[in-house]
Image (tube, grey):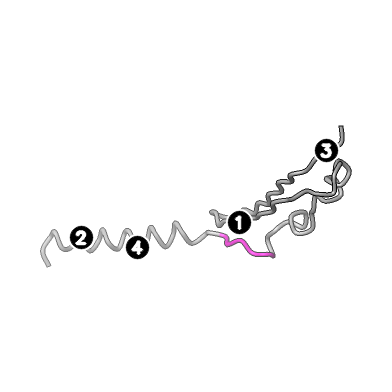
Amino acid sequence: MTLPRVSLVLLFLACLIWFAVDHHPLVSPTPDNESTFLKTYTPAKVIDQFKAAPFSEQSVGSSSGAEREFATHQADFEPTLVIKT
């Protein structure tokens, strides 16, 4: 093997090792590592206190992501309603 080929093989092996080590500690988001608060919280009781009209809508969304050594979970609540003044 010539020197450029050896260098190329070593570089490739180094990249494989870096990829394996760098991506190994990722924690995938699962229901097991989601907080009880996000699993059970609903803003309905709070929103009902301020409703002035029976019509309203609420957009609800959630997202999660894998990070190094932890997972993230996020919930979004976006109510649209007429409030009491």
Q: Residue flagged by tag 2: what amino acid is it?
A: Leu
Cα distance in 3D space between marks 4 and 1: 27 Å
- The picture quadrant where one finds residue 6 is bottom left
Residue 60 rendering spot, x and y as whole percentages = 69, 53
Viewed as shown, does residue 6 lie left or right of 21? left
The secondary element bearing badge 3 is classed as: strand
- Magenta portion: prevailing SS class: loop
The structure residue drawn at horizontal position 46% and vertical position 59%, both measured from the top left corner, is: 23
Disc 3 target residue: 83
Cα distance in 3D space between marks 4 and 3: 58 Å
Q: How crowded is mark 3: few (under 14 residues within 10 Å), some or many (20 or more)?
A: few
Question: How many numbered callouts?
Answer: 4
Instruction: Identify the magenta region.
Output: 27-31
Do labels 2 and 3 touch, CB within 8 Å? no
For the residues carrying marks 2 and 1, which lies nearer the camera in this image? 1
Name the residue at the bottom extreme: 1
Do labels 4 and 3 touch, CB within 8 Å? no
Q: Which mark is residue 31?
A: none
Q: Is residue 29 magenta?
A: yes
Disc 2 target residue: 8
Q: Earlier in the sequence, mark 2 or mark 1?
A: 2
Residue 72 rendering spot, x and y as whole percentages = 62, 53
Q: Which of marks 4 and 1 is nearer the N terminus?
A: 4
Q: Residues within 10 Å of mark 2 (few under 14, many from 20)?
A: few
- The picture quadrant where one finds residue 28 is bottom right
Disc 1 target residue: 64
Q: Residue flagged by tag 4: what amino acid is it?
A: Leu
Cα distance in 3D space between marks 3 and 1: 31 Å
Cα distance in 3D space between marks 2 and 3: 67 Å
For the residues carrying marks 4 and 3, which lies nearer the camera in this image? 3
For the residues carrying marks 4 and 1, which lies nearer the camera in this image? 1
